[in-house]
Amino acid sequence: MKIAVILFILMYVLIIFLPKYRVWAALGIAALFLVLGILPIGEVPAAINWNALMMMSGTMILVYYFIESGMPGKIADLLLGKSKNLMMVTIYMSLFSGLISAFIDNVATVLIVAPVAVAICRQLKVSPVSMVLSIAVSSNLQGAATLVGDTTSIMLGSYANMDFLDFFWMKGRPGIFFAVELGAALTIPVMIFLFRKDTAPISHSGTSKVKTILPTFLLLLMIAMLIGASFIKNKPDVTNGLICLALAALMMIVDAVQMHSIEGTRNALKNVDYQTLLLLLGLFLVIEGVTEAGVIDRLADLIGSLGDKSTFILYTVIVWGSVLISAFIDNIPYVATMLPVLTEICAKTGIEPCLLYFGLLTGATLGGNITPIGASANITGVGILRREGYNVSFPEFARIGIPFTFVAVMGGYLLNWFLWS
């Protein structure tokens, strides 16, 4: 366990201070976990979230065609025509990404919305860093709003036998949806403050043209199919990934047939962000190694030991402890470990389970916004910026991520306590 913790910390130190080599840092530490036997080789296939990697790959291909079609530029024209200044555009884009991510995967949301932000900033000749990061953290924030918005929400729904409507209204009380939306509303003043200098009037005349609507149609179809698939019980774990890859393959086939050439297909495959995929691959292995070493179990036991002292203290530690933990490790194994711990605590103490369940989901889902590698959506957003020539540092990300996280978690933390304590 000590070696696992030391290697885990070393990986983060390397990622923070040597961001250009972050992929090699993650893969190198993952290799050490395998060599040292911390992560058994036989556990490697199960440790990798193939569904997430497949979803990202398929969506990246569709987004390439979406960008090439000119649709992001057209959407940018429409948004700029309705916005007084860059600050309002950033707020609109953030809220828009949050709305989408309440119903589909956060990474897919970033891949769809971020190109529009880049197109807007390119037209205005400004840096897209703030807007893309706001989109990423907003999409991560709203993932806990519904049963289908995030993997952790699906896990809670399955574990607690909750359906889609239970996230809105459960046991005669408002569900976690309203706590998440309160947190989202509280980020608006944060954005107004952070981007208060971006108030120069926008002078823009829309000139973008759309070559084809097929990529846009397929992206909308992907969203509809992902929502529909979320209601299917006992489906394969890679269902969402297969949907995204199938639609991407369809797009490439149609393009090759129409153009009588595979040049477009070749360019689409070249534009897949393989660095981000490899980074996630390394992180999946390292996190599974930490889990195998018992680190997450130890943390869960430590938090659970507070149940005999005070409900409020326990709830507070669960929420804010989850924020800190999920800022550095994947929230999926953490939530999976904590759900039975919380159930046992509630059985012994008589605490309403939804109070602790919703507190766990609030902290674990939103906590990933503290660091650029705390959530897949943030990794994706940073990867998009890197491809545009902008390298995002930890302090630069923290300038947006930390205030977003604090106000959003605080809103959910207080409302959940008020409704369920």
Image (tube, rainbow, N blue to C red):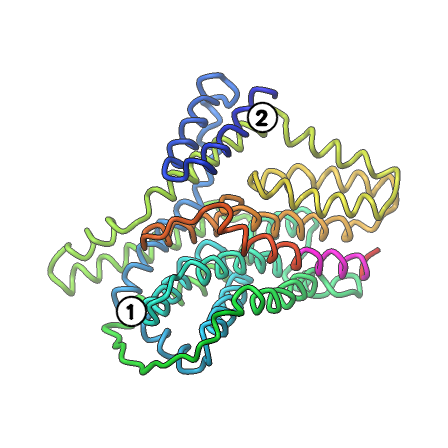
Q: Residue at x 67, y 44 (%)?
A: 322
> Which residue is tagged 2?
5
The image shows residue 253 at horizontal and vertical percentages of 22, 57
111 inside magenta stretch: no
Quarter of the view holding residue 171: bottom right
Q: Residue at x 54, y 54 (%)?
A: 399
Quarter of the view holding residue 202: bottom left
Q: Main secondary structure of the magenta part?
A: helix
Provide the secondary structure element on which disc 1 rests. helix
Distance from Cα at disc 2 to Cα at disc 1 = 48 Å
The image shows residue 11 at horizontal and vertical percentages of 48, 31
The image shows residue 420 at horizontal and vertical percentages of 81, 57
The image shows residue 268 at horizontal and vertical percentages of 24, 54
Tell me the magenta residue range: 409-418
Q: Is residue 44 left or right of residue 350?
A: left
Q: Residue furthest top?
A: 36
> Which residue is tagged 1?
214
Q: Is residue 184 left or right of residue 256?
A: right
- Residue 241 visible to the viewer: no
Viewer-proximal residue among 318 and 144: 318
The mark found on residue 193 in the picture is none
